[in-house]
Image (cartoon, coloured by chain):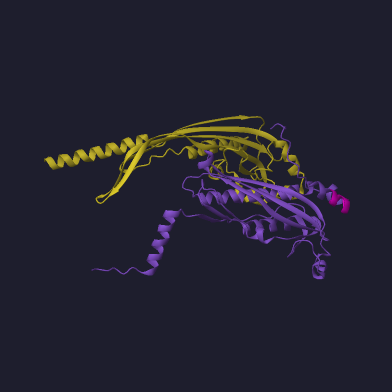
Chain colours: A purple, B yellow
Amino acid sequence: MLMIKVPNIARIAFAALLYCLLSGCANTLLVEGDFPDPLIEPIPISVGVHFSDDFESFQYTEESNDRDKWIIVLGDIQQQLFEIIFQGMFSSLHSIDSSPPWESTRERDFLKDIDIVLIPQVNEFQYTLPSETKINVYEVWIQYNIKAYTATGDLLADWILTAYGKTPDGFMQSSEGALNQAIVVALRDAGANLALNFKQVPELRAWLAGREPAIVKKGTFDSEPSDPNATN
Amino acid sequence: MNKSDYIRLTSQVLAWGFCALLLSLCGCTNVTVDHYSTAALERNDSDAVVVLGRRYASNYDTEIDLISCVGESLAEGAADITVIPESEFVDRLYPWFEPRTAPLHVTGLHKLIDQAPIAKIMDEYKIRHIIWIDGNTETTHSSGSIGCSIGVGGAGCFGFGSWDRESNYEATIWDYRDRSLIAKVSTEAAGTSYMPAVIVPVPLIARVQNNACKGMADQLDTFFLSASAE
């Protein structure tokens, strides 16, 4: 009897292919992109930022049986965005290893020159594909929760930051590419929202006004949206 | 002429006739361009223009490649306009020209121009006019079917498909220096693409978006050229 010897690697590849065909492979998307520095007047305060492990390694896994399997990894890129935005927003930025309460002497010493500490978290991530909405765009929504603490660990402000991005379904463009682009647009939107509306958060506005009245009143950058009722 | 020559000649005539038929069907696009002005357009030779896409609508996005196409066509036009690339402009002025934050009306320019860092970059680019383009190209109808099969003897397709595409864009020209609306140019284009398949599918694409781009860019170029001549 004639026996054909099949190399091990070919067997493994065939088994993997068969598994994918039978089970349905998950699309893994490692989101990539670049963000520009924000063109805004830095607020003259010293800020600490803490990115939790959940934030740094955030990935969305599609659990629904009615949708294609997607694993969307955006921990790295969202951290990159927040670092760029925070660096542009404040005169001084420091990375903080831990969240409050800060009880050790080392932590307290480190925080003594810091005015506030910001901690962002992802609340929700959603996306839709053209095949689901019947319109030729990929859409992404991200909801962040940002908490601001004083250097002593007291909660100063807690607000929601929403972001939305979309990109058209292009000819010969892959789903991965289009979804990546929509997420980058959403992250840019998050950055714009954060940079322009930070001083509009009531608790922060009051804190900034009480701490240094000139910061808010003198501000050369006004983040209020343009008047929608004005005529062209 | 023997029989084989006759058959060869007949098949060549048929082949050329088929090609001519396909070419006559290819790329039929109707483009309608219209514009109105509300103020005289003024410009110096050193003034630059930026072409930006509107992306705030919920059900479509003005395509990035359409904006690039209009910008490049305008830069190559007779009016000799310096066009700043959209992505470069939007990145340098981040976050002021994002879909959520960009001024929707010309009065919104007041808030931007009053801010020194923004005004500095605008002056650096020598921006005089901002052209906003809003609209998209979409497939409105499709029909027909093509079937393909593969076997031991080979593979092939047979069938016929067609689809209609429509473009609808409006360009709004703002004078950044005077903070005023100068003109609007609207462009509509429609065309039908075909794909006959006899063994091999032959796509006969009507370049609807590209023709809309060229139509709009030509009109804008004429508009800027008339300002230069005055």
Residue B147: x %, y % from top left:
33, 41
Farthest residue in the left direction?
A: B2
Q: Which residue is painted at 87% across and 54% down in the image? A: A211
Q: Does the magenta stretch include residue A208?
A: yes
Between B223 and B195, the one lying in front of the other is: B195
Give the number of callouts: 0
Dividing the picture into quarters, in which one does residue A81 lie? bottom right
Left or right placement of residue B161 versus residue B7 in this view: right
Along the viewing direction, whichever of A95 and B203 lies nearer the viewer: A95
Whole-percent x and y of residue A37?
Answer: 69, 55
Chain part drawn in magenta: A206-213
Residue B162 occupies which quadrant of the picture? top left
- Residue drawn at (31%, 69%) of the image: A5
Q: Is residue B109 left or right of residue A70?
A: right
- In-image side of A143 versus B12 (left or right): right
Q: Where is residue A198 in the image (x, y as percent from the top left)?
A: 76, 49
| Quarter occupied by the C terminus of chain B | top right
Q: Residue at x 30, y 39 (%)?
A: B19
Q: Is residue B135 visible?
A: yes
Q: Is residue A113 magenta?
A: no
Q: Picture coordinates of residue A8 (x, y %)?
A: 38, 69
Q: In this view, does B23 lie to the left or right of A200?
A: left
Whether residue B89 is visible, yes or no, is: no
Quadrant occupied by the N terminus of chain B: top left
Q: What secondary structure characterizes most of the magenta part?
A: helix
